[in-house]
Structure formats: structure tokens, C-alpha cells
Image (cartoon, rainbow, N blue to C red):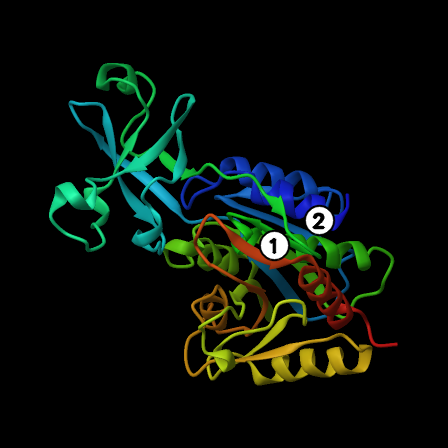
Amino acid sequence: MEIKERIIRLSEACGASGSEDYACQTALEMLREYVPDARIDNGNVVGRFGEFREGLPSLLLDAHIDQVGFIVTYITDEGFVKFGNLGGIDRRLLPAQQVVIHGKNSVKGVICSVPPHLGGSDGVPQIDEFSIDTGMTAEELKKIVSPGDSVTFDIKCRELLGNRLTGCAMDDRSGIAAILYALELLRDSRLSYNVTVLFSAQEELGERGAKIGAYKINPDVAIAVDVSFGYAVGETEHKCGYMGKGPMIGISPSLSREISDGLIKTAGNKGIPYQLEVMNGLTSTNADRFAVNREGAKACTVSIPLRYMHTPVEVIDVEDVKLTGELLAEFIKEAE
């Protein structure tokens, strides 16, 4: 499967935090091309890649499977669906968004709120002031939709100019695609690590899947493959990466400088374009969990530049996904 097709399939597989089943099944099918005995374990997709060799350090390759979304809280007597957010979502983008409620059947709707000229305020409504209008009555809805059902944006991927794609859940399905591409490049290679792959659940709710996954796997080294901010107009350039210029290698006091430097050296030796992402504390990625797992792991981040994070129109450059996979593969290969 071409890497672009893989990104599209992954990003369109619904899986809000806590309800990742469909996305997990989609990723599991792809992972089994390289790890035939991969499985879903307590909500995470996990599998050991390649031949186990005694004496090698263990390395965990991780990307999170969940996406931001919403959860149904109740249905009003008038037939409107009330909801809360799953993960950080900018409320300014919610009015008029098309969504899917994942009940007994999928129900499509639109997010609505009292319009400014009737509400007497031009501020951004709070999350509990929004509703979902499906066109159904409360009686009809309650046969299909229940409190606790997840809701996701009703979005299909679209190709932009060049190598760019837009859609929702690029955070972090593009990271999963990068790992799968790395495994493709490593098919016939000898490795310098015993590698386990983890596509972890509930990252957007506090890295919960990473915590339980890392505890069981107990790696020596862990790399969280995620997304970070791609520069767009009006943003502070030194806090962002540039799209199309390669993966962002994390440097932070909470990360292993040994692994950061190793990734930088690998990129330089192999001529792989890369960027640095310097953070002054925690990374807000699964690496934060890996670094303090049990007795600790040497953790690092490798991030794909992404614009418009946690919106229905996230944008990535396919070339960055490819280069991220190449960097991971070269880092894991046994030195020649």
C-alpha cells in the first residue's frame, strides 16, 4: 500500500479517545503485514517486530491511535444531543461542523448554538452551550444514541497541492503511517534493538494507553512518534517546524539526550533532512510516560510538522511522514 493511501485510510478510521476500536482494527490489519502475531491488548495495538536476539536492548516504537472528539452527555426533550469534549478542542471552530454520532447505528448531525444576534453575546459559547441537531425527535434518538457514545467530525481526507493532505486525525495517524513505513524499510535488515510496536489508546486524555503499554513491555529505549506544530502565518517561527523539511527531533530535560543525539547523528550520516524541537520541560506526548516507566526508559520524540492541530482540517506533508519513517529505520538498523 502506498504511504499516502495508508495515511488516508488511517485518518478516516474513526476512533475518539476511549472508543478506538475501529481505528485499532484498521491499524492492526496494517501492522500484521509486518508483525503477524500483533494483537489488541487492553485497548492498545501491540506486536514485536523481527527476530528476538538475546543481549540486544529493547526499543519501543509508539504512536497514539486515538483522536480528539466528543462524548454524548444527554438528549434534550426537544431532540438535541448535548456533549462534552474528548481532548483539547478550540470551541471557536465548532458552530456548523458536521459530525457523526457513533451509537447503535451511525447518526449524522450538525453542531449548533444560539446565534449571536439572539444570544446577546459575541463571545465564544462554552462547550455545554452547543448541541448536535440530527433532525430526529428525542424518542427516535434514544433508540439509537445513548449517553457515553462517542462523536467525531464527519470529514474525508483531501489532497492539497504538492504532497499535502488535509483531514482530521492526522494527529496521530500520520505517526502510525511513519512507523509502518519504517517497518517496511526494515523488512530484511538486521536490527540493533529488539523492537516492539505500540499504537496506544487515550493519549489525548493523559497518555493512558502509553502508561499501561510501557509498563508491560518495559523497554530500554522508547520513541514517541507524534505530531508538532507546523509553521503557519502569524505563528512564532522558532516554536514551529517547517512542513516538508523533515521530522522534528525532540530535545528536552525530560528526554534522553543520548537518544536525541543518536537520532541527530543518524540523520546527518544518512543525509535525512531533520529539524530540532527544543522544549523546556515535559513534551505533552507519550514520551513523558515512557521516561518514568518503572525504573525509567531512555525516551525521545520524533514529530511530524502539522498545521491546525485538533481541528477537522489538520494538514501534513506526506514527505515528512516518509522522512520520519526513514529516520526511524536507519536509527534501528544494526551499524554497518
Which amino acid type is marked by label 1?
Ser
Q: Quadrant of the C terminus?
A: bottom right
Residue at position x 50%, y 74% in the image: 296
Q: Which residue is mark 1?
A: 174
Pointer 1 local density, CA inside 10 Å: few below 14, some 14–19, many at least 20: many
Pointer 2 local density, CA inside 10 Å: few below 14, some 14–19, many at least 20: some
Displayed quadrant of residue 89: bottom left
Residue 179 lies, with reference to residue 34, above or below; the image says below
Residue at position x 60%, y 49% in the image: 46
Q: Are marks 1 and 2 in contact (CB under 8 Å)?
A: no
Q: Secondary structure at mark 2?
A: helix
Farthest front residue in view: 117
How many numbered discs sit on the rendered protein?
Answer: 2
Q: Which residue is mark 2?
A: 4
Percent coordinates x, y for residue 161 in the rendering: 67, 54
Q: Quadrant of the N terminus?
A: top right
Q: Nearer the viewer, mark 1 or mark 2?
A: 2
Residue 31 seen in render: no
User: Which sits in the foreground, 273 or 205?
Assistant: 273
